[in-house]
Image: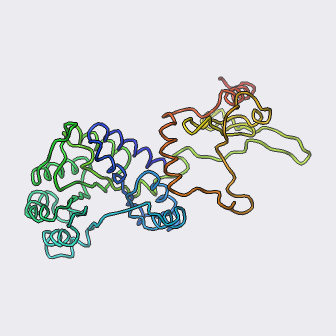
Amino acid sequence: ATLSRFTRDLVEDAFEKSVTEELYFLKDSRLHDFGFRGCASVEQAVLGGTAHLLSFEGSDTMSACYHAQYHLNDGKPVGNSVPATEHSVMTSWPTETEAVAHTIETFGDGLVYACVMDSYDYDNALENVIPGLADKVKAHNARFTIRPDSGDPTEQVLKALKAADKTFGSEKNKKGYKEVNNAAVIQGDGINYKNIKRILEVVMEEGYAANNVLYGMGGALLQKCNRDTMSFATKLSYIQYADGTEQDVMKTPKTSSSKTSLPGRLWVGRKDENSPPIVFPKELLDKKDPAVAGFQPVLKVVYDKRPVPNAFDQFDDVKARLKKQWAATPANGNPISSQLQEKINSILRARGHKV
């Protein structure tokens, strides 16, 4: 979820610089989930693929699209895809030209479709195969999406853009960037957050608008995420012993300050929907301390011995809330309240740590 959201930030920044407002709806389709086939199980694909759908609509992970639509969103669609070839399809035809021509004839009428173009010779495909079918593409009034799938991602995207520009032509938009006619590029090989950032930078440096390029992320999206990605850990923070004695608990290893945990019972609240969540010591709430006056709880019980009925909102509502609250949360912000930070510092000092 976080990876897709940070990628969405890259896309939105690039669109603001290079794409006109009437095409902003294309932001929803810029990152496509290609990760289903590499997952260890359907459950893994559902978890990661559904999280991705909070920020983008493009997905080939059908299990996640089905789960989000029918189990989380009352049957309303949340994901979509386009007709697209892969290497087995392309190489099953006698020639690459015939494979592409069939795709155009089958899916070309006013639609977006994609063809992988590196099955044999990517340069030849760009210089000869696609130009030879250009009139057919134009006649069907569709968007032919070129997919490189090997080589350096940035170089291959730029090569495809320039070839498409030469074949189909382009128009400069109101922001001064070129939008290629009848064609686009989708890069799905070796894609991760850093590559997308680099490709966007180079594409715009070359004078092309960000909406000319889409990205498919597979392993990096659904598999290269683990507990260290977000430094996630669950720690004991408070204990009540059998005799009723209560004690705050805090891990403070001198060999790694980054593993310091939070002490005591905690409470998470926010002033309003446009304010970031803040973590407070729970005792402030119990004492009705002015520091938490006006704050509303962020967390709610969803499981108490069994699932709590109607505890979860519809997927569309969660997606809308994410969009609103992400914008309200400062980048690299600190969710720790000053009161909790002082409590942490006090314990650290008592244990001989420098604060």
* Residue beneath the point at 62% across and 46% down: 233
Residue 261 x %, y %? 67, 38
Q: Is residue 40 visible?
A: no
Q: Nearer the viewer, residue 203 or 303?
A: 303
Residue 183 x %, y %? 19, 55
Looking at the image, residue 12 lies above or below residue 169: above
Classify residue 252 as left or right of residue 25: right
Classify residue 306 as left or right of residue 136: right
Classify residue 66 as left or right of residue 82: right
Q: Nearer the viewer, residue 10 or 345?
A: 10
Residue 241 x %, y %? 86, 46
* Residue beneath the point at 39% across and 58% down: 33
Residue ranking furthest to the front: 22
- Where, quadrant-wise, is the C terminus in this rendering? top right
Looking at the image, residue 305 lies above or below residue 164: below
Q: Is residue 326 visible?
A: yes
